[in-house]
Image (cartoon, helix red, strand yellow):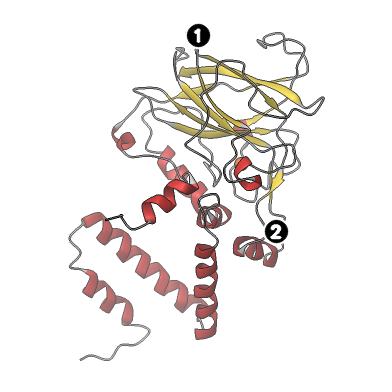
Amino acid sequence: MRELTPETITDAVLEQMATTSDPRLKEIMAAAVKHLHDFAREVNLTPGEWIKGIEFMTLVGKMCTPARQEFILLSDTLGLSALVNGLHDKTALEEGTHTSLLGPFYREASPRLSAGSQIARHVKPGSECVLYGRVTDIKDKPLANATVSVWQTSADGLYDIQENPTATDYRGVFTTDAEGLYVVRTVRPCGYSIPMDGPVGNMVKAQARHGMRPAHIHFLVGSPGYRELVTALYLRDDPHLADDVVFGSSDDLAVDIVPDDPQSPVKGVPSIRFDLRLSREGEADRTSGRVGSDPSAILKEAAPAAH
Ligand SMILES: [Fe+2]
């Protein structure tokens, strides 16, 4: 038996894992081990620090419920979700609207609504706005019957599932018309803090970060034959447009609320126009490009099968 040292342990682990039959699993795990070991060597990780790290990840897992996904929040606040999104974008056949984070508050069970429906149950006076735009391919050909799913926070900066895990509000699924047009009535989105009452919030506080996301509305757009688009619009005048705590915002996704846009399909209400361009579907789109999930779906998948 050879003697293992901090210098030789990495090769010993890689050697033992070399029997992995799935080549992609083998590649991912070998790289993960190499980088984890390099990380420990680089910072000269102490036993107490590593236990603290394990305690932290244990708390992150315990915080997860069908309505809250603390691990997605961790991935988001470390920039890993944005990085994986960016890598996925590079595999698109064509350059459409850029993607942004799905985030931890997406929900598959959203109501299907007719064009122009209001997605908020309560609309405070003066807060209503119209959200509209065209869904096209990258050559501006309108995509009829495309599915446009939107979700956002209330005026208090909370998603429906944060207020009540069984409530549905501030979200809906719309369909484009023959011109590729979608029309949604909603309320002005506001910037909000990510949940700061859990381990990820404690990490963000320890780093003296503000924890804020700029005002945004999430989109998930689909049309047969085209790459599913996960994106969001961001309000240009938000003070946190440039320092989003989850690295989702970007200038090309920034929009204005226009008080009297003559092209708006609904007159007399401030409007946001957000056009969406989809790339044709390619080889890389056989698996989902969503970095994130409905929190309840993740727990369902993680639960042992019933017998
Ligand atoms: Fe969000």
Name the amino acid type tagged 1.
Glu
Q: Which quadrant, please, contains the C terminus?
A: bottom left
Where is residue 18 shown, x and y percent of the image?
20, 68
Q: Where on the picture, by quarter, is residue 120?
A: top right
Q: Which residue is mark 1?
A: 179
Secondary structure beneath label 1: loop
Give the residue at x 38% y 33%.
Answer: 92
Q: Is residue 270 left or right of residue 253?
A: right
Q: Nearer the viewer, residue 91 or 289?
A: 289
Query: In the displayed structure, would residue 216 be above or below residue 138?
Result: below
- In the displayed image of the protein, which residue is found farthest to the right? 125
Give the residue at x 74% y 24%.
Answer: 128
Q: Nearer the viewer, residue 18 or 193?
A: 193
Give the residue at x 60% y 39%.
Answer: 167
Where is residue 215 shown, x and y percent of the image?
69, 38
Q: Is residue 71 left or right of residue 122?
A: left
Contact check, label 2 and label 1, Cβ < 8 Å: no
Q: Which residue is mark 2?
A: 209
Q: Where on the picture, by quarter, is residue 224?
A: top left
Q: Is residue 151 left or right of residue 5?
A: right
Q: Nearer the viewer, residue 82 or 164?
A: 164
Query: In the displayed structure, would residue 267 be above or below residue 302?
Result: above
